[in-house]
Amino acid sequence: MIRIEQFKQLDLRVGKVIEIKDHPNADQLYILLVNIGGKEPLSLVAGLKGHYLASDLLGKEIIVIINLEPAVIRGVESQGMLLAAEFKGKVTVLTPDQTINVGAKIR
């Protein structure tokens, strides 16, 4: 269990995928460039190949944790994390159910 104060430390935002590339060193990873509004876009490494075509992710609004410490994944820096659900091998990226401004804070 974590306290609500710990959860509130996460900065969750609506982002929009503006570019997507194959990871040069991993078969199951994409590199996504995500607009989070007002700041420089974030580069995220995500294990979504096999679940999504790159064309299906481009332009998609997603939920992103933007205040994680950057991590190097197979040689590429990831500056945040997108949220996705997984059940019995099926992965679904979490998205807002309505159009909302990029950068909107998740509460």
Image (spheres, helix red, strand yellow):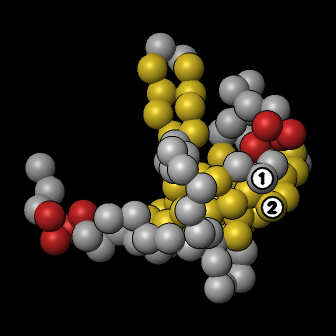
Query: Where is the C terminus found, in terms of image quarters?
Result: bottom left
User: In the rendered image of this protein, does residue 37 appear above or below residue 98?
Assistant: below
x and y, in percent, of residue 52 in the image:
74, 31
Which image quarter: residue 28? top right
**Front in this rendered view, residue 40 or 69:** 40
- Amino acid on which the number 1 mark rests in the picture: Gly
Residue 71 at least partly seen: no
Q: Residue at x 56, y 32 (%)?
A: 92
x and y, in percent, of residue 70 in the image:
57, 70
Q: Residue at x 72, y 74 (%)?
A: 41
Regarding mark 2 in the picture, which secondary structure is present there? Answer: strand
- Amino acid on which the number 2 mark rests in the picture: Ile
Which image quarter: residue 80? bottom right
Which image quarter: residue 22? top right
x and y, in percent, of residue 57 in the image:
76, 43
Residue 61 at least partly seen: yes
Q: Is residue 59 left or right of residue 6?
A: right
**Front in this rendered view, residue 19 or 100:** 100
Q: CA distance from mark 1 to mark 2?
A: 6 Å
**Front in this rendered view, residue 7 or 45:** 7
**Front in this rendered view, residue 44 or 104:** 104
Quick one: label 1 or label 2, which is nearer the N terminus? 2
User: In the rendered image of this protein, does residue 10 appear above or below residue 32?
Assistant: below
Q: Are marks 1 and 2 in contact (CB under 8 Å)?
A: yes
Question: Would you name the residue on which mark 1 appears?
Answer: 59
Q: Is residue 60 left or right of residue 69?
A: right
User: In the rendered image of this protein, does residue 22 appear above or below residue 61?
Assistant: above
Q: Dot 1, how many residues are within 10 Å of its Cα: few (below 14), some (14-19), or many (20+)?
A: some
Question: Would you name the residue on which mark 2 appears?
Answer: 18
Q: Dot 2, how many residues are within 10 Å of its Cα: few (below 14), some (14-19), or many (20+)?
A: some
